[in-house]
Amino acid sequence: MRNLILYLRDFLKSESAVQGFEVYKFIGDGWVLLFPPGVSGHDLVSFLEKLCQLFKHKLNKHVAPHLRTTPSVMGLTFGIDQGKLAKFGMMGKLEYIGRPLNIASRLQESIKQKDDNPAYKILFSKPCFHALAFAEGYRKYKPVTRKLRNIRGGEKYPCMKMSLKH
């Protein structure tokens, strides 16, 4: 698993230079990626599909054969929001805070709600999805609601769900 994570780290580092996003933080089993304002929905989803293909290939080749038991869910999940972040230095590192980080992380963790097969799926906040301006008929998506921890007092949060090819 360590080698898979290191391989993904190197892939993200090289892609960030090409795609223009920032690999902000690794959190145990995933990354927080910050994309610049104006990124196209098509480019973002195409990149995530490429990431998923790489992950699935490396997982099946290098990790899955060594598992004693297979987890019920194996695959990447994504939460995406947009908005302004505040950045500042803390203990010698650049840190960001802001509602978009909170929303995106809650969306990512809530994909499993009401979904027996959450792998390789994205939950977008509804405003973010519309701002990304996907072309009509670009791919299948559907409106869903989720309860996001510590967001809107536990009320249902409207979002858009999209599956990635893999």
Image (cartoon, rainbow, N blue to C red):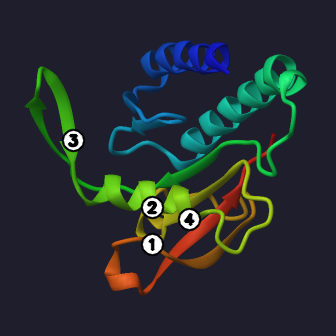
Marks 3 and 2 sit apart, C-alpha to C-alpha, by: 16 Å
Q: Which residue is mark 2?
A: 106
**Alpha-carbon distance for marks 1 and 4?**
7 Å
Question: Relative to residue 78, is residue 128 drawn left or right?
Answer: left
| Residue that numbered label 4 is attached to | 110
Question: What residue do we see at 53% from left, 72% from top?
Answer: 159
The three-letter amino acid code for the residue at tag 4 is Ser
Amino acid type, mark 3: Tyr
Marks 2 and 4 close (CB-CB < 8 Å): yes
Q: In the figure, 37 relative to 158: above or below?
A: above
Q: CA distance from mark 2 to mark 1?
A: 6 Å
The residue where tag 1 is placed is 148
Distance between the Cα atoms at labels 2 and 4?
Answer: 6 Å
Residue drawn at x 37%, y 38% as measured from the top left:
34
Mark identifier at residue 96: 3
**Quarter holding the N terminus?**
top right
